[in-house]
Amino acid sequence: MNKEALGVDIGNVIIDHRLISKEEAKLLEERYSTIPATDGVFDCLKKLNDERFHGNIFLISKCTPWAKEKVSAWFKDNDFYNKTGVKPENVFFCQERSEKEKICKENNITHFVDDRLEVLSYMIDKVPNLFLFKPNEKEVEEFKQFLPKVIMVESWGEVLNNIL
């Protein structure tokens, strides 16, 4: 049997940009590492790593080179790797949302958590377990034909319950 693997998006799934206003976002460009983690993410990733995926957790994010630098610093400044057990070499960045599917295939991802239904739409019939995390209603409306193929979750506790 192939080992299971979890893929997780970063923005609004691990780092909670929703908690900051547009005005604060400008200020936080200098203090990106102070953007809060999504509630429960550290404990839930640690538990999933320990009890189910055993080192097979991958972070996959579409972002610019600037954002990649900020996100990498956020992980370091928030002691992310020690708190979750996720390995730094299991972090992947890509330029386009559709590229996440290829990274999932290369790493045999069996479960994926993202806040964008568009991203999950590329993975349907390729990644067996898809979780739509606190999605934006307008974006969901645009890609609603894919809703029956995903599990909607509103918290890391729900992700944990669905996977464990």
Image: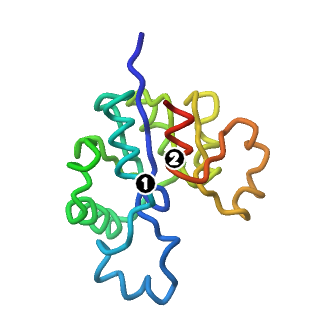
Name the image colouring.
rainbow
Element at label 1: loop
What is the crowding at mark 2: few (fewer than 14 residues within 10 Å), some, or many (at least 20)?
Answer: some
User: Counting residues from the N terminus, which is met first, the one under dot 2 or under dot 1?
Assistant: 1
**Would you name the residue on which mark 2 appears?**
157
Element at label 2: helix
- Indicate whether 71 appears above or below 117: below
Tell me which corner region of the image, top left, top right, bottom left or bottom right, holds residue 116. bottom right
Q: Amino acid at mark 1?
A: Gly
Contact check, label 2 and label 1, Cβ < 8 Å: yes
Q: Residue at x 31, y 46 (%)?
A: 91
Q: Residue at x 39, y 63 (%)?
A: 37
- Indicate whether 148 appears above or below 59: above
Give x and y (percent) for residue 65: 32, 65
Of 49 and 112, the residue lying toward us: 49
Of 97 and 73, the residue lying toward us: 73
Of 28 and 119, the residue lying toward us: 28
Q: Amino acid at mark 2?
A: Gly
- Left or right of 57, for residue 159: right
Count of numbered badges drawn on the protein: 2
Tell me which corner region of the image, top left, top right, bottom left or bottom right, holds residue 108. top left
- Indicate whether 76 appears above or below 56: below
Give x and y (percent) for residue 155: 55, 52
- Whole-angstrom CA distance, mark 2 to mark 1, is 7 Å
**Would you name the residue on which mark 1 appears?**
40
Image quarter in which the N terminus is found: top left
Q: Which mark is residue 147?
A: none
Q: Residue at x 41, y 86 (%)?
A: 26
Give x and y (percent) for residue 145: 79, 44
Q: Residue furthest top?
A: 1
Give x and y (percent) for residue 70: 29, 68
What is the crowding at mark 1: few (fewer than 14 residues within 10 Å), some, or many (at least 20)?
Answer: few
